[in-house]
Amino acid sequence: MSSDERIYRLVFEYYEARILYGYYKYGENLPSISKICAVFRMAPATVRAGLSVLEKQGYIKIDARKASKVIYKSNPEMRRRSAAEYFVPRKKAIQDLLMSSELLFESCRVLELNQSNFGEWEKFRPSFEQNTDHTVPVTFQFCLMALRALDNSLILNLYWEVLRFLKFPYLAEDEMRNIRQENFEGKSKSECIVMLTGYFKDCFHKSVKRLFDFIDEAQREFELEQTETFSFQWNIYRQRPQFCYTLVCSVIRDIENGIYTKGSFLPSLPKMAKYYKVSVSTVRRSLSILSSAGLTKSFQGKGTQVLPEAVQADIGRPEIQDGLRMYQESLQLLKLTIKNVLLRTLGCAPDTQKQKFAKRFSELVKAEKGYLCIEICLAFIEEECPLSGIKECYRKLRELTAWGYPFAVHRLKDEAYYEAFQKIMEHAAGHLGRDEISGFADCLEMLLQQEEKNIREIAVD
């Protein structure tokens, strides 16, 4: 599925859930296209595409001159069964994802909330000061306002994917509608945000309780105890084919890990296609991107060689720009979440695995290969974190951060940068060796912050 298709399906799935589970009933109107555009931050054409799918599925009737009307007929029993068939098989995954989301999004909201763009705040404030019907629950809009302040499409992508899986926030009765303007009169933006954060948490906890009460009842009522379970998967929205980017990341990581040694030739196109389970044309496009990234060079009649030393990347190429942007946004997400995730993971991992991790980390630092330490940290979290939602998220981030390898190698040639980098890594290795988890996490956070700043400067240049 392309990026555009995934984006317009957000509109489709949001309103499908609201119709299926009875928020919008037969004969009622959906909000106007302009209102949906304003909240979802989508172009009219994208919203129309989502509504068109709703019409094809028999949920609504579109009228060019009026708001779309719901034509789907259901009764309370149908709605209850539909909800049961969706939520019961996902109970364990939802429980896990809720705990994972606290680690992923709480840091983003708390850290960036007071930095929300003033224009965003001015647009948002009327929606909680007026007791009107909302296109999207105010709790949604509040969280989106905070996350948009980060200016990071990857974080918003993850947020939407989590909501698509959880689904119940789409259905929540919005207690924030009871908020009145007088509650906020005379208060500063910061004071209002503190109050809204409290309202948000209260609303969310009430919604969670209602959901699990319903699941427990519906599981018995509809005899769904033995149903197949589902797990969360993070689909990353891209403007270009996913397979090509995934293969590029896989080959970069295989170069980093010594599977393809520097100076050697990669296997033939058919062999690589078979090994990575992709088409030959995907391999060919991926090798072209790797060449532009400065890692390989193709020779007519001889094949593709892993360069003995990475050369300057062609950052003007669209695919490289896109990979660079994803890398920078991945670093920002990691910077905001890594400390809490590491504390959780290292706090639960067996001592033998922690010792093995600490030893490997220290070996890389001593071998002056500290640029690989982020990779092994993400691999350790993917392997040892007790939350599968975090594992899924960090698995994808581990893939995306592989794009930074050629840039890191070049920066380490600068003596001043290398000395500062090595010093941080030595401190990190020391903390980890002494089982000082918080100090270790602080070092990684500092490193990620510096790396994000460097990559942002490259992208701007």
Image (cartoon, rainbow, N blue to C red):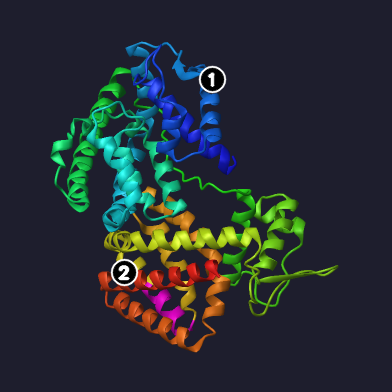
Q: Which SS does the magenta portion mostly show?
A: helix
Q: Is 265 left or right of 44, judged from the image as shown?
A: right
Name the quadrant of the C terminus.
Answer: bottom right
Say if 222 sits above or below 437 in the image. Answer: above
Label 1 – label 2 distance at C-alpha: 55 Å
Q: Is 186 left or right of 212, judged from the image as shown?
A: left
Say if 351 sits above or below 191 in the image. Answer: below
Decide if residue 228 is in sight here.
no
The quadrant where residue 249 appears: bottom right
> Please, which residue is most extreme toward the right here?
301
Residue 210 rendering spot, x and y as whole percentages:
23, 29
Which of these two is toward me, 340 or 18?
18
Residue, disc 2? 441
Instruction: Say which mark, if any, is on residue 291.
Output: none
At label 1, the amino acid type is Ala
Residue, disc 1? 64
